[in-house]
Image (tube, rainbow, N blue to C red):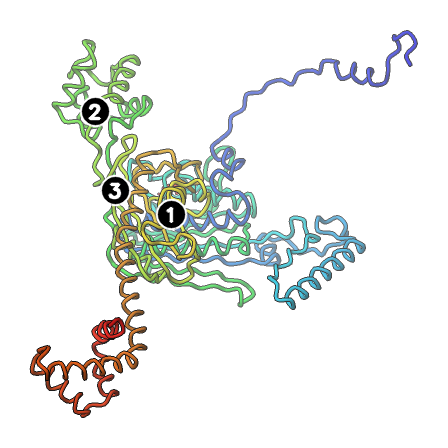
Amino acid sequence: MDGDGSSESPIETKKAKSKTPRKPKETILKQKSPAEFFAENKNIAGFDNPGKSLYTTVRELVENSLDSAESISELPVVEITIEEIGKSKFNSMIGLVDRERVDAALYDDYETEKAREKRLAKEARAQEMQAKNAALGKKVKDTPASKAIKGRGEASFYRVTCKDNGKGMPHDDIPNMFGRVLSGTKYGLKQTRGKFGLGAKMALIWSKMSTGLPIEITSSMKNQNYVSFCRLDIDIHKNIPHVHLHEKRENKEHWRGAEIQVVIEGNWTTYRSKILHYMRQMAVITPYAQFLFKFVSDAPDKNVSIRFARRTDVMPPIPMETKHHPSSVDLLLIKRLIAETSKQNLLQFLQHEFVNISKSYAERLIGEMGPDFGSKMTVKSLTSQQLVRIHQLLRQAKFDDPSGHCLSPAGEYNLRLGIIKELHPDMVATYSGSAQVFEGHPFIVEAGVSVGGKNVKQGLNIFRFANRIPLLFEQGADVVTRTAHKRINWSSYKINQMQDKIGVFVSIVSTKIPFKGTGKEYIGDDITEIASAVKYAIQQCCVQLKSKIVKKMHAREQQERKRNLSRYIPDASGAVYNVLKEMTQLHASKKIRYGDDDAELLSKVSENLITKETLCEKLSKHVEQVYSLALCVKVS
Ligand SMILES: Nc1ncnc2c1ncn2[C@@H]1O[C@H](COP(=O)(O)OP(=O)(O)OP(=O)(O)O)[C@@H](O)[C@H]1O
């Protein structure tokens, strides 16, 4: 115990020490380049881990190729190859000499002799249990992969190459297109797969982070007698391209297109099925393209080569660039449009820089803005307050909806073809909605619902597409998944949600896809216009399917009935035979009358000139009648 309470306990000493004010660190203002930001937050662009990075790299390159070919109305031909690079090969590529492990205990996957024995004993027990269960006919679960070999393990490297027949790139633009984050040619108000000017650069940033190797671009444009070759990486801090080699080479074969090659760390084993799903779904939504997908490994049994053949030459129309809808603009955008416009006065500006504002409507809007505004006022001289007033009015005023002419949906024909080609369903129905609008952005929803098919699981199989990109991740919160699971009463369309193999395909196209997150993986459920359009499109498919299903059920019932009746015929005909005999007697006694043809048959029956068997054979063509007759006989 403390005597006078004045002595310092060790704890107090510590506390007192910790209370001594530390010299505050000087606050230093720093800036980050966009490349640095995305390198540090690569998960938001879909580069979460090596496996997902391999998937996203493939996706970004394929989508760039499709955008490029479609922009010149060329039927796309895209070849994508993933080549596995073993550790030794990778080391020799970067000039590193292979080294054997010397201090084994230094490694993350090191296991002591005791731990190894324990693990093996546990595995043996699990195997024994499995064998017992199998012998008893019980369901056998796979034994989980051994946990002993944890650790990060060896990295796997892959060379990803994507070649297309698109429009190629201007020689001088290549370094900036691939070496400057947030630069691209798809920023206009237009339906494109790419939007952010990020995808290809992220693949390069990931290659720089994981292998240190540069990206290689080969490209040639129409009528160019040379091929551009560029090898570059990116200066992350400055967000500028670092060019290793940029030259023009001979183009003897008059080739046109682009080939991008990048070496990255990846994980084929865990993302194989995702990548193949992506390719398959891309083939569904793009049946006018031809894809050749290859995975090449040192172990030939792991090799994959799949050709997704072109099934139609009908390509959706090229999406058109459009102007902004007045209800969709914000203050910043108005300022940007004013800075960029070539129009002098407010009237011309409103009339020409937006869709759905005619001259007379622009005049009415200006009148409504107040006495400070006039048609002839110079648009570039508007004050900040005046801009706010314009913005307020544009948000509140009524405008016609934007038309969907600028959009390029896959088309019902293509969607149906894609579904049939890839899934081979028993039944399919498709629907293409008309253009609608959310927050001033036009959008079109198309849907397909299939029942049955190859490689389709029981229950709901959801296939989502946005601007003709398959969406494979973060399915749960997506508007399509939620609608299909919660807002469609499948049984009312005679579809069994649990047992039938149902394919639900929904494709949404828009000048602005309201993705949640930058990963472009799912569309939120919160935009009512989109949610109800999705529900309506699926319902329309279901209505079509219901009538097909009812017809099919009816035909099946009929067939079943006939099959049962045919079994009944021999008995029934015996009864009929007796009736017929009775009828002849009734006829003879003039109690009933029948026609001459019948008379002939009946007289044969009564004279025993026709046997029961022959009658039975004749009657099998009229099973329905025999059945009803036989029923009458039984009843009477
Ligand atoms: N295969 C290709 N053929 C022609 N141009 C290409 C090709 N790949 C990339 N480009 C050009 O490089 C630019 C940058 O591509 P990047 O993938 O970085 O961004 P993006 O496609 O514009 O947008 P996002 O990040 O949303 O995919 C593209 O806008 C395009 O102009």
Q: Which labelled disc corresponds to residue 464?
A: 1
Callout 1 amino acid: Arg
Residue 226 shows in this picture: no
Quadrant of the rendered image containing residue 313? bottom left
Viewer-closest of 626 and 555: 626
Q: Earlier in the sequence, mark 1 or mark 3?
A: 3
Which secondary structure lies at badge 1? Answer: strand
Q: Which labelled disc corresponds to residue 407?
A: 3
Residue topped by disc 2? 398
Q: Earlier in the sequence, mark 2 or mark 1?
A: 2
Callout 2 amino acid: Lys
Viewer-closest of 418 and 485: 485
Viewer-closest of 297 and 133: 133
Which secondary structure lies at badge 3? Answer: loop
Q: Position of residue 423 (x, y in %)?
A: 37, 60
How far separated are the C-alphas under marks 1 and 3? 18 Å
Indicate which label's residue lies in the foreground, 1 or 3. 1
Callout 3 amino acid: Leu
